[in-house]
Image (cartoon, rainbow, N blue to C red):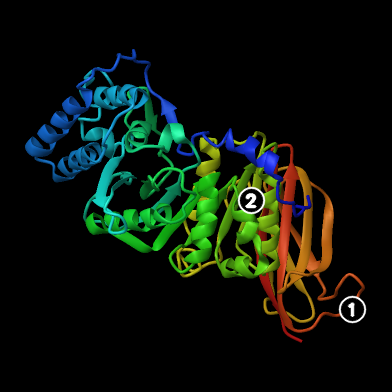
């Protein structure tokens, strides 16, 4: 199924989208229901005392530092609104409610990946205390180096507008994390709230990464950047600005219209020509068109490591879609190959281009691919600059492994010159769309 470039949304539509940006971007699930206790006027003092006590008496240095970071965030809070006081009660209860399965005072809640570790620091930019949350790897050992996934949140004043709201997002008796599919550290920066990852909102991301690396061992070649909605814009933006940092970038329903679509210019997108990028968006999401445009522009640069997939739904971030993105990224390294040096694998449920033989080739090559399920399949050949050379196949297909031949000629039957060519396969079914790409070398 052809993926068509879209147009930037108009201003009225942008305002509509802003109203739904508060959809959670972090996989979470509801815990057992708990009654809501009315806030007490001295609650922030009680919570400070609790964190002070935990940080002083705990024999676990990581947990002590975690409590000290929460205390730093509370001390930096000058005033507390009534709404934030109610949230503070939940934070307090997450530590003191001994009936809760994932009580935040038990270190097992962190090693079992149901609660994150809080990191805090004083920003050298403006002297403000900032913070981030860090989910530990499965079967965590402080002596091992692990991959790092930086996940940028969407726009929501309710969830990220203040330090207290950010803490409540992850310390709430009625809600715990669901990070069972991750295999490394997951960094959840505050980003100073809703600044679209500009200014201190951007420097906050780099400061949070430094905070992680100051206390934990990170595999520098396996750092991944992902985000939802405003965070999808942030991952696209930071990916363009710092491509040498990341092994892959994930854009989940990115609000890429922001800044007037300045980051969709082909000369800007060209920076990501060698970066593996995974796009995912709901089929009825108002942001689908602009994400298709970004994908199409990136495809024109000759980038072979792209996936664009959709799912039935709107502006939402289902856990299974995060899992699919992560599974695709998992084997990728910053150097541009799988961990075994082979070509990049694609996630289960996507079409896979297994390779072409011979490669380099002259005058023809055989392209092998798999299709995960019945649906429409389209296979096209592009030149290195992104121009369409030929459509090899456009038909309904069953699931299975197949082969198609290319004789090195364009759609008019003329032999094409020596060069690098891109084979792209796209599949569409009732479950959504996905795509994969492969580089081929023709030598006359």
116 left or right of 322?
A: left
Name the image quarter holding the C terminus: bottom right
Q: Nearer the viewer, residue 169 or 372?
A: 169
Disc 1 residue crowd, few under 14, some 14–19, many 20+, Cα 10 Å: few
Tag count: 2
Residue 383, quarter of the rendered image: bottom right
Q: What secondary structure is marked by label 2?
A: loop
Decide: is 390 above or below 208: below
Answer whether residue 355 is visible to the viewer in this image.
no
- Residue occupying the point 32% across, 23% down: 173
Q: CA distance from mark 1 to mark 2?
A: 40 Å
The disc, 1 or 2, on the residue closer to the chain's N-terminal end is 2
Q: Nearer the viewer, residue 75 or 321?
A: 75
Residue with the mark numbered 2: 257
Q: Are marks 1 and 2 in contact (CB under 8 Å)?
A: no
289 left or right of 28?
A: right
Answer whether residue 247 is visible to the viewer in this image.
yes
Decide: is 43 above or below 180: above
- Residue occupying the point 41% across, 45% down: 182
Residue 438 screen position, x and y as percent? 66, 66
Residue 157, quarter of the rendered image: top left
Residue 396 screen position, x and y as percent? 82, 47
441 left or right of 272?
A: right
Residue 3 screen position, x and y as percent? 75, 52
Q: Which mark is residue 119?
A: none
- Residue occupying the point 58% across, 33% down: 20
Residue 283 screen position, x and y as percent? 69, 39
Residue with the mark numbered 1: 414
Q: What secondary structure is marked by label 1?
A: loop
Q: Nearer the viewer, mark 1 or mark 2?
A: 2
């Amino acid at each position: 199924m052809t993926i068509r470039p879209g147009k930037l949304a108009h201003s009225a539509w942008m305002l509509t989208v802003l109203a739904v940006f508060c959809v959670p971007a972090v996989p979470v699930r509801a815990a057992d229901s708990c009654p809501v206790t009315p806030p007490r006027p001295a609650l922030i003092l009680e919570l400070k005392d609790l964190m002070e006590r935990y940080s002083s008496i705990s024999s676990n240095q990581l947990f002590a530092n975690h409590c000290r970071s929460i205390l730093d965030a509370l001390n930096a809070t000058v005033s507390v609104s009534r709404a934030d006081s109610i949230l503070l009660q939940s934070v307090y209860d997450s530590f003191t409610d001994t009936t809760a399965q994932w009580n935040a005072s038990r270190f097992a809640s962190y090693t079992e990946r149901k609660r994150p570790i809080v990191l805090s620091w004083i920003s050298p930019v403006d002297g403000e205390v900032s913070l981030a949350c860090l989910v530990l790897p499965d079967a965590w050992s402080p002596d091992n180096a692990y991959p790092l996934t930086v996940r940028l949140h969407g726009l929501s004043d309710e969830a990220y507008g203040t330090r207290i709201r950010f803490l409540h997002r992850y310390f709430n008796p009625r809600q715990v994390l669901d990070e069972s599919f991750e295999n490394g550290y997951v960094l959840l920066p505050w980003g100073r709230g809703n600044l679209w990852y500009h200014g201190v909102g951007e420097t906050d991301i780099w400061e949070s990464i430094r905070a992680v690396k100051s206390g934990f061992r990170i595999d520098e070649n396996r750092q991944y950047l992902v985000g939802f909605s405003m965070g999808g814009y942030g991952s696209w933006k930071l990916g363009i600005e710092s491509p040498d940092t990341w092994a892959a970038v994930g854009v989940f329903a990115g609000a890429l219209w922001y800044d007037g679509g300045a980051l969709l210019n082909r000369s800007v997108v060209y920076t990501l020509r060698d970066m593996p990028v995974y796009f995912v968006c709901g089929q009825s999401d108002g942001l689908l068109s602009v994400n298709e445009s970004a994908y199409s522009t990136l495809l024109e640069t000759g980038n072979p490591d792209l996936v664009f997939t959709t799912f039935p739904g709107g502006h939402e971030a289902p856990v299974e879609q995060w899992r699919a993105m992560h599974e695709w990224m998992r084997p990728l390294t910053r150097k541009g190959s799988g961990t075994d040096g082979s070509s990049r694998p694609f996630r289960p449920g996507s079409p896979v281009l297994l390779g072409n033989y011979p490669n380099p080739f002259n005058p023809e090559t055989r392209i092998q691919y798999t299709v995960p399920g019945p649906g429409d399949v389209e296979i096209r050949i592009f030149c290195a600059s992104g121009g369409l050379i030929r459509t090899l196949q456009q038909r309904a297909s069953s699931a299975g492994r197949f082969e198609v031949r290319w004789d090195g000629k364009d759609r008019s039957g003329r032999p094409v010159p020596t060069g690098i060519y891109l084979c792209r396969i796209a599949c569409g079914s009732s479950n959504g769309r996905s795509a994969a790409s492969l580089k081929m070398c023709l030598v006359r």
